[in-house]
Amino acid sequence: MATGNVRYARYILFAVFGIVVIYLISTSSLPQYTEPIKSNAGQLLGGLTGGEKEKPAQETIATSRHFEAPTTTTTSHTYAAEPTSPNPKYGEVNELSPPAPGERMNATFVTLARNSDLWEIARSIRQVEDRFNRNYNYDWVFLNDKPFDDAFKKVTSSLVSGKTHYGEIAEEHWSFPSWIDQEKARQVREDMAQRKIIYGDSISYRHMCRFESGFFFRQPLMMNYEWYWRVEPSVELFCDVHYDPFKFMRDNKKKYSFVISLYEYVETIPTLWDSVKKFIKQHPEHIHKDNSMKFLSDDNGDTYNKCHFWSNFEIGNLNWLRSKAYIDFFETLDKDGGFFYERWGDAPVHSIGAGLLLDKSEIHFFNDIAYYHVPFTHCPTGEDVRVKLKCHCDPSQNFDWKGYSCTNRFFEMNGYDKPKGWEEQA
Ligand SMILES: Nc1nc2c(ncn2[C@@H]2O[C@H](COP(=O)(O)OP(=O)(O)O)[C@@H](O)[C@H]2O)c(=O)[nH]1
Ligand SMILES: [Mg+2]
């Protein structure tokens, strides 16, 4: 009788022990696909402070560690009834990289590249896929002023988990418009070459900047989408992206976003602000009453302080770029010829467009998307975020709070508190 009780107690002990072990194993991995972390002030700054809540259990899925039991990865998915993405692989389960649960936005990555950029863009794609897209399977649109060759298509389509599309840019989007005085433009290039202004003598770089400013979002392939994430060759992503930034943008009414901001090289845009002021006068109806003029100008719009969001990284809304307001803005600038008579970059053009046409609350700073494009790094401020997101960037390299960054101004304009630890990185 006593022996029976002891045996019975031992069984209970084993059972309790077993349950505890299973519980510990099942809760040992990081929460996946949670929304970005809000700061104390409720700012959507993505992971600046702790305190976020884990999502309910049905929204977490097995990580690749659990791939030996793929059925468990599919049962909890909550796809929208109607897929919003044209991705034909949508809903397929890759056992090594099970798709994240939840709906998909009508979104795509977009890359402008030459065939010769293949191995540099391959590196970028691999990082974007490893850190984010292998679980989300968004499409990727590649654009080029020449036809893409088979090698480019073969390698890039093998790396992208979504569907890939390849588009050739129409000549009128990559050439001198009729109103440009070619001789005047040639002299400018010669002069800039002598003054050693970066890309100052390049025709193709000017076509590229004009294309990115005014045409990429209305390419036939891009017309299928509402959201884009721009990726350039040779960029790096240093942290896991554990939620869907496209969905974040939609849910939080964002239209444009950045990770790095800085001052533009003044020699490339001496008369850009004159054209902007002309636009403001001609189209006061397009200027948002809660705009970001404070970010762009220190004298209420009289002069430009050269601050801009670095457009080699962008997540944004294509319908906004296709709006009458933005098209009127682009066309006013384009008519003045500064893409060719100077060397206006698409970064200040997009930034001024976003700064004037959008509500300032529609522009988002992604603290938790860690990024490098030569020569600047955005490495999230806050060790807790970096550890949680498995970041491999050196925080001392973070550009955000250095003197040449404009991110400080963005925080001030919005009344955001700077994240803890920013002083050590200034
Ligand atoms: N198809 C094509 N893409 C280009 C050309 N020039 C630049 N790009 C692309 O435009 C983007 C910006 O060019 P990049 O050389 O990175 O300029 P930077 O980042 O300002 O130094 C990259 O995605 C390039 O691949 C060109 O002549 N043809
Ligand atoms: Mg680049």
Image: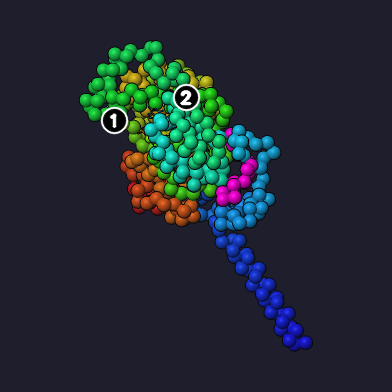
Q: CA distance from mark 1 to mark 2?
A: 27 Å
In magenta segment, residue 103: yes
Q: Whole-percent x and y of residue 238?
A: 43, 48
* Viewer-nearest of discs 1 and 2: 2
Nearest to N terminus: mark 1 or mark 2: 2
Q: Tell me: residue 105, above or below residue 417.
A: above
Determine the main secondary structure of the stretch shown in magenta: loop
Residue 43 belongs to the span the image colors magenta: no
- Left or right: where does residue 95 sit relative to residue 333? right
Describe the element under mark 1 as helix, strand or loop: loop
Residue 313, picture quadrant:
top left
Residue nearest the observer in this picture, 147 or 227: 147
Residue extending farthest to the front is 150
Q: Judge whether 186 appears above or below 251 on screen.
A: above
Q: Which residues are magenta?
A: 91-106
Kind of residue at badge 2: Glu
Q: Which mark is residue 198?
A: 1
Q: Which mark is residue 217?
A: none
> How many numbered discs?
2
Residue 202 visible in the snapshot: yes
Q: Give the amino acid at mark 1.
A: Ile
Which quadrant of the figure shows ligand 1? top left
Q: Is residue 38 left or right of residue 172?
A: right
Label 2 sits on residue: 168
Residue displayed at 56% across by 49% down: 97
Note whether residue 292 is visible.
Answer: no
**Which residue is drawn at the image coordinates 48% and 52% (left, top)?**
389
Instruction: Name which quarter of the figure residue 172 lies in.
Output: top left
Mark 1: C-beta under 8 Å from nearest atom of ligand 1: yes
Looking at the image, residue 300 lies above or below residue 98: above
Quick one: label 2, few (<14), some, or many (20+) residues within 10 Å? some
